[in-house]
Image (cartoon, rainbow, N blue to C red):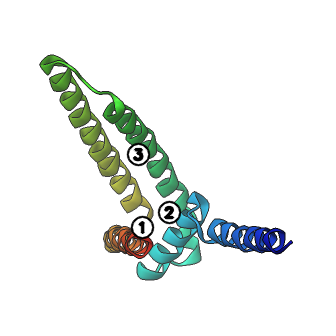
Amino acid sequence: MKQLILVFCLLFVMQGAVAQHKRNGFTPERFQAELEQYITKKACLTPKEASKFFPVYSEMLSKQRAIHKKMRNLKRIKPTTDSECKKNIKKRDEYEIEIKEIQRTYHEKFMQILPAQKVYDILNAEDRFHRQMFKMAAGKKRKKR
C-alpha cells in the first residue's frame, strides 16, 4: 500500500515537472516575438516603422532558414573520400556566401524603409539579442550538469 502511494506521488510530481518544462521550453514563436520586441525597443522603432520593417525582416529570416537547413543536411553527410570532402567544403562555402548575399540585399531593402541609423541600430540589437540568448542557453546547460 505504501509503495502504491509512493508511486502515485512520484507520478504527480513528475507530471508537474514535465508541464513546467513545456511552459518554459523553447518555442520559435516566442523567440521571434521576444526578438521583435527587443529590436523595437533598442532601435526605438515607432509602431508604424515596425509594421513596415518586420514583414521584410521575416522574409529575410525565412530565406536564411532555408539555406541553414541545407547546411545542416550537408553536415549530416559523412564524406568518405578526399574529393567528397572538397565538394562538401565548397558547397558549405557557397551556402555561406548565399547567406551574406541575402543579408546585403535585405539590408538595402531595410534602408529603403528606414533611415540607415535605425537599420544600424537594428543590426546591433539583433546581434546583442542573439548573444544574450546564447549566454542564457549556456547557463541553463551548466545548471543541468
Residue under the point 36% across and 70% down: 138
Q: Which residue is mark 3?
A: 64
Q: Position of residue 81 (x, y in %)?
A: 17, 18
Q: Which three-letter amino acid code belongs to the residue tagged 1?
A: Leu
Residue under the point 26% across and 41% down: 96
Label 1 and label 2: CA atoms lie apart by: 8 Å
Are there few (<14), some (14-19), or many (20+) residues within 10 Å of tag 1?
A: some
Corner quadrant of residue 135: bottom left
Label 3 and label 2: CA atoms lie apart by: 17 Å
Taking 16 as reference, is 59 above or below it?
A: above
Quadrant (top left/top right/bottom left/bottom right) for the N terminus: bottom right
Judge whether residue 49 can be spotted in this image: no
Residue under the point 42% across and 81% down: 42
SS at circle 1: loop
Taking 88 as reference, is 11 above or below it?
A: below
Are there few (<14), some (14-19), or many (20+) residues within 10 Å of tag 2?
A: many
Q: Nearer the viewer, mark 3 or mark 1?
A: 3
Q: Which three-letter amino acid code belongs to the residue tagged 3?
A: Gln
Judge whether residue 144 can be spotted in this image: yes
Q: Which residue is mark 1?
A: 114
| Nearer to us in this view, 113 or 31 | 31
Q: Which of the two discs, 3 and 2, labels the residue nearer the N terminus?
A: 2
Tell me: 52 left or right of 100.
right
| Nearer to us in this view, 94 or 69 | 69
Q: Nearer the viewer, mark 3 or mark 2?
A: 3
Quadrant (top left/top right/bottom left/bottom right) for the C terminus: bottom left
Q: Which residue is mark 2?
A: 53
